[in-house]
Image (cartoon, rainbow, N blue to C red):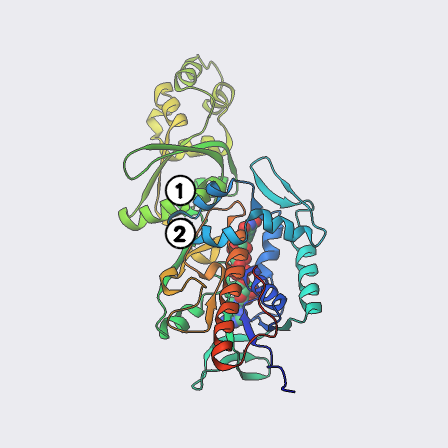
Amino acid sequence: MTASPAPARVAVIGGGPAGLFAAERLRAAGIDVDLYEAKGSVGRKFLIAGKGGLNLTHSDPFEVFAARYGARCAAVGAWLRRFDADALRAWAGGFGIDTYVGTSGRVFPLDRKAAPLLRGWVRRLREQGVAFHVQHRWTGWTQSGELSFQTPAGERSIGADAVVLALGGGSWPQLGSDGAWVAVLRARGVDVAPLRPANCGFDLDWSPHFAQRHAGAPVKPVVVHWQDDDGTPRALQGECVATATGLEGSVVYALSALLRERIARDGHADLALDLAPGRSREDLQAALSRPRGRRTRAEQWRREAGIHGVKAGLIHEVLPREVLDDPLRVAAAIKRLPLRLLRARPLAEAISSAGGVRLEALDGGLMLRALPGVFVAGEMLDWEAPTGGYLLTACFASGAAAAQGALAWLRDRGTASDRGCRERPRDP
Ligand SMILES: Cc1cc2nc3c(=O)[nH]c(=O)nc-3n(C[C@H](O)[C@H](O)[C@H](O)COP(=O)(O)OP(=O)(O)OC[C@H]3O[C@@H](n4cnc5c(N)ncnc54)[C@H](O)[C@@H]3O)c2cc1C
């Protein structure tokens, strides 16, 4: 009798949703999985996402959903075809966590929390035999091709039959994903687009007076107007928040890729805010033309146009003092307040990252062409999407795709070298 070959051993590095999901898929196929995480616990960014209600995915129809990934919609769409929003909801349901569709079409767990899901997930992975190694910071490869880690006990080098890197992007680095991997992979000949802020705020350099009085104030409702590159006028209703230096919030995040690229090209990006959606300029002009008697200007704007607080502050910020009593100019500013955005906020503050490992550097199984046996998943790949659950969904879907790629690669290699997986990989 011949001994059956030892199961393949895969190192998954990075304990965010992409890495955890790749580990789950690999383990389900009978692979020995070691999960390495730099921090003392996994899923820190996932937990922070839970503070905002954990927008797990979106109820968009498939084609609309895939289109959210812009230039990368074909590649991300291919991952999503194997693991989509419905599959993600069903997966969460497997932990007894039901989801619901909010008014905006976004999908949340009923309790809007990440911690119960993450706890249940890690417990199940441990029970299934995934070995967790926290406080293991991956630093690259040794001369002999082993993975090297910094650990509290010093440097460790570890061998593996294949590797899945799921190290995240560069936003909120205090949670673990600090983008330090960029230099390591570039040194190995991997094409990595610079990490840039996505779903981020922008600086406008307010006056100290505005910043002091209105930082933190929500500007809502508001309609943002802008022009596409071909001059087509566009508009989007939503909410934003004034910060000490500029604007942030959902409507700004939704436009952040366009604004960031425009600033890179022109040095600035122009928007106009409609501070009174639902009222016409003529109506506002007529209302503001009524004699104000003993009322202050601020009182008149509030009563006649519903403009006060941060909205009034914005008009003061933009219009010259001498036209503040001109109903025509003020009504026009309320309907189209021109704002010039100067800079994206730093990557560390952004919700997510653009840039990362270029998809052209990978084969169809998400394996690095420059480093056979090394697969990549999650936000460290070069795609971006707006908020709305699209980020997490693509992290899960790419985790599944990288696991499937690794399984196929190990299977082929096992056939060639008589070494491989104990069980035939299941199609995820
Ligand atoms: C405030 C906030 C709210 C968010 N809310 C949502 C939301 O509601 N919905 C949504 O879809 N998305 C949301 N996101 C985005 C989402 O959380 C991320 O896109 C997602 O977590 C990325 O998953 P990932 O597995 O690719 O990377 P990460 O979650 O960043 O995980 C990467 C892991 O790798 C580890 N790591 C990094 N370098 C090393 C190394 N050298 N060695 C070992 N380990 C390493 C890190 O410590 C980390 O644990 C939010 C993000 C933020 C910041």
- Single out the residue that lies furthest toward the front: 1
Quarter of the rendering containing residue 230: top left
Q: Nearer the viewer, residue 385 or 64?
A: 64
Label 2 vs label 1: CA separation?
A: 39 Å
* Label 2 C-beta lies within 8 Å of the nearest ligand 1 atom: no
Q: Residue 12 placed where, x, y %?
A: 55, 70
Residue kind at label 2, given as amino acid type: Arg
Taking the image as shown, residue 133 lies to the left or right of residue 80, namely: right
Q: Residue 351 placed where, x, y %?
A: 49, 52
The total of numbered circles placed on residues is 2
Q: Residue 109 placed where, x, y %?
A: 66, 47
Q: Can residue 242 be seen in this view?
A: no
Taking the image as shown, residue 127 lies to the left or right of residue 136, namely: right
Quarter of the rendering containing residue 5: bottom right
- Residue positioned 54% across, 50% down in the render: 84
Q: Can residue 367 be seen in this view?
A: yes
Q: Name the residue under label 1.
A: 207
- Are the residues flagged by discs 2 and 1 in contact, CB closer than 8 Å? no
Residue kind at label 1, given as amino acid type: Ser
- Residue positioned 39% across, 20% down in the render: 281
Q: Nearer the viewer, residue 60 or 392?
A: 60
Disc 1 residue crowd, few under 14, some 14–19, many 20+, Cα 10 Å: few
Query: Element under label 2?
Result: helix
Q: Residue 221 placed where, x, y %?
A: 50, 31
Q: Nearer the viewer, residue 212 or 281?
A: 281
Q: Name the residue under label 2.
A: 72
